[in-house]
Image (cartoon, rainbow, N blue to C red):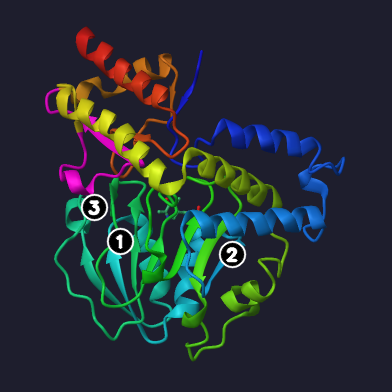
C-alpha cells in the first residue's frame, strides 16, 4: 500500500532528492566512491557546497553582504549561537511555542531578554499581534512556523530592529525579505534534506559587535572564513539539501511553491472546517500554518480519536498523531508533500465521517 508521509521531522523529501542521494551513496559525481566516503575538501564535494550556497542565495534572493553556512548541531545549537554572536546586552523575543521558549532560555545566558509577547496563556494557539519592541534591543527573534502547535507568521513581522528567525519548519515555503534579518537559521530535516545540516544565513555587518569572547567553533566568522568547513560538515546531508534546492528551482522557486502550499493547506483546512467530526486547532485563519496542520476531534466525538487514528493508518497515513503537548492530530504538509497524499487523508476523513 502507498504510504502517505505526514511526519513532522525528519519528514517527506522529494522523490528527486531520494533518488539522487541513493545514486550518490554508491557512485558520487563519477568518483566511483560513495558521497559518504570522499573528503569534504575534494573538488567534487566543494562543488556541492558551493552550488548549495549559490542556490540558497538565488532562491531566497539573498542580498550581498550575507553569508550562507551549512553547520551542525541543529536549530537547537543556533538557539545559543545566535545570541552568542548577535546580542550584546539585550534582545527581544516573541514566544509562540516550545521552540521559541527553548530559544529564550538559551538567550538568557547572554544578556537581557525582553519577551515582548507570548501566547503561552492559550497553549500557543495564536500568534500575538499587539506588542511593542524595544528599539535598543539588538534584534527581535521569532519562530516563523510553530511546528508543534500549527501556527505561523505567514509574512515577515514588522519591526523597527533587525529580525532573527528560526525558520526550521517553513524555510523555502514562502518568500522572505532577507534584508530585514541579521540571521535566519533552520535545521535541514523539515523542508530541506536529511537531518545533520543546519542552514544559517547571517548578515556579515552584524558580526563582531559583541563584547564577549566567542569560542572558535561557535563564532560565525570562523565558519564564514572557512566556507562551513572549519570542522567536517555533514556531507551527506548537505548533498541531500542541494538536491532539494535543485528540485525547488525546477518547481519554479519559492514564489511558486508558496502558491502551491496555499492551495495544499487550503484543501485540508476546508475539510476541517466542513467535517463534523474534526475541528482545526488554530481558529484564527491568518495564524494557520501551511506546513503543520493541527486538528482535534470536534466536541462530542472525542471518543472517536483512537478509531480514526487506526482507520487512517489502515489507509496508509503515517505520522498524523499530534504532538503530546497538543493532542489530536498533526498533518505536516511540507514542500515535498504531493497533493495526492492530502487528498487521501481528506478521503479517509470523509469515509470515517460517513461511517459514524
Ligand atoms: C524541529 C525544530 C527545531 C529543532 O531542530 P533541531 O535541528 O532538532 O535542533 C527547532 N525549531 C523548530 C521550529 C523546529 O521545527
Quarter of the image with the C terminus is top left
User: Mark 1 sits on what residue?
Assistant: 156
Q: Residue at x 37, y 47 (%)?
A: 147
User: Which element type, helix, strand or loop, lies under badge 1?
Assistant: loop
Queried on whether the Cβ of the residue with tag 2 lies below 8 angstroms from ligand 1, the answer reads no
The percent position of residue 165, horizontal first and vertical second, equals: 39, 64
Queried on whether the Cβ of the residue with tag 1 lies below 8 angstroms from ligand 1, the answer reads no
Queried on whether the Cβ of the residue with tag 3 lies below 8 angstroms from ligand 1, the answer reads no
For the residues marked 2 and 1, what is the alpha-carbon distance in whole angstroms?
21 Å
The percent position of residue 96, horizontal first and vertical second, equals: 28, 58
Tag in front: 1 or 3:
1
- Please tell me which of labels 2 and 1 falls first in the chain: 2
* Label ID, residue 124: 3
Q: Is residue 82 left or right of residue 139?
A: right
Question: Is 231 above or below relative to 347?
Answer: below
Q: Give the range drawn in magenta.
A: 280-300
Q: Residue at x 48, y 64 (%)?
A: 62
Q: In this view, does 293 lie to the left or right of 182?
A: left
Please tell me which residue lies in front, 215 or 153. 153
User: Mark 2 sits on what residue?
Assistant: 69
Please tell me which residue lies in front, 117 or 288. 288
User: Which element type, helix, strand or loop, lies under badge 3?
Assistant: loop
Question: Circle 3: is it few (<14), some (14-19), or many (20+) Cα within 10 Å?
Answer: many
The reply to whether residue 160 is visible in this rendering is yes
- In which quadrant of the rendered view does residue 73 lie? bottom right
Q: Residue at x 32, y 41 (%)?
A: 290
Question: Is 161 above or below relative to 21?
Answer: below
- Dots 1 and 3: beta carbons under 8 Å? no
- Dots 2 and 1: beta carbons under 8 Å? no
Amino acid at each position: 500500500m502507498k504510504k502517505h508521509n505526514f511526519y513532522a521531522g525528519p519528514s517527506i523529501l522529494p522523490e528527486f532528492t531520494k533518488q539522487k542521494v541513493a545514486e550518490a551513496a554508491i557512485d558520487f559525481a563519477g568518483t566511483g566512491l560513495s558521497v559518504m566516503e570522499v573528503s569534504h575538501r575534494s573538488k567534487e564535494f566543494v562543488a556541492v557546497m558551493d552550488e548549495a550556497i549559490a542556490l540558497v542565495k538565488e532562491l531566497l534572493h539573498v542580498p550581498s553582504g550575507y553569508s550562507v553556512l551549512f553547520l551542525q548541531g541543529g536549530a537547537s545549537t543556533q538557539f545559543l549561537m545566535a545570541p552568542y554572536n548577535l546580542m550584546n546586552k539585550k534582545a527581544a523575543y516573541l514566544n509562540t511555542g516550545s521552540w521559541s521558549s527553548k530559544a529564550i532560555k538559551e538567550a538568557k545566558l547572554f544578556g537581557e531578554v525582553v519577551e515582548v509577547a507570548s501566547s503561552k496563556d492559550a497553549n500557543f494557539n495564536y500568534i500575538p499581534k499587539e506588542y511593542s519592541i524595544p528599539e535598543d534591543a539588538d534584534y527581535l527573534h521569532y519562530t516563523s512556523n510553530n511546528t508543534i502547535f500549527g501556527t505561523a507568521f505567514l509574512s515577515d513581522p514588522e519591526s523597527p530592529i533587525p529580525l532573527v528567525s528560526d525558520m526550521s519548519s517553513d524555510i523555502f515555503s514562502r518568500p522572505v525579505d532577507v534584508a530585514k534579518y541579521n540571521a535566519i537559521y533552520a535545521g535541514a530535516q523539515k523542508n530541506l534534506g536529511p537531518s545533520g545540516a543546519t542552514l544559517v544565513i547571517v548578515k556579515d555587518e552584524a558580526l563582531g559587535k559583541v563584547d564577549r569572547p566567542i569560542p572558535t567553533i561557535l563564532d560565525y566568522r570562523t565558519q564564514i572564513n572557512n566556507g562551513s568547513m572549519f570542522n567536517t560538515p555533514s556531507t551527506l546531508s548537505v548533498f541531500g539539501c542541494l538536491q532539494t534546492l535543485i528540485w525547488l528551482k525546477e518547481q519554479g522557486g519559492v514564489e511558486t511553491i508558496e502558491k502551491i502550499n496555499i492551495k495544499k493547506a487550503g484543501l485540508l483546512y476546508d475539510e476541517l472546517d466542513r467535517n463534523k467530526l474534526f475541528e482545526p486547532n488554530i481558529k484564527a485563519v491568518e495564524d494557520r500554518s501551511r506546513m503543520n496542520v493541527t486538528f482535534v476531534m470536534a466536541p462530542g466525538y472525542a471518543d472517536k480519536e483512537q478509531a480514526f487514528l487506526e482507520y487512517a493508518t489502515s489507509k496508509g497515513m503515517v505520522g498524523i498523531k499530534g504532538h503530546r503537548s497538543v493532542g489530536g492530530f498533526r498533518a505536516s504538509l511540507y514542500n515535498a508533500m504531493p497533493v495526492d497524499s492530502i487528498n487521501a487523508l481528506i478521503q479517509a476523513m470523509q469515509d470515517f465521517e460517513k461511517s459514524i
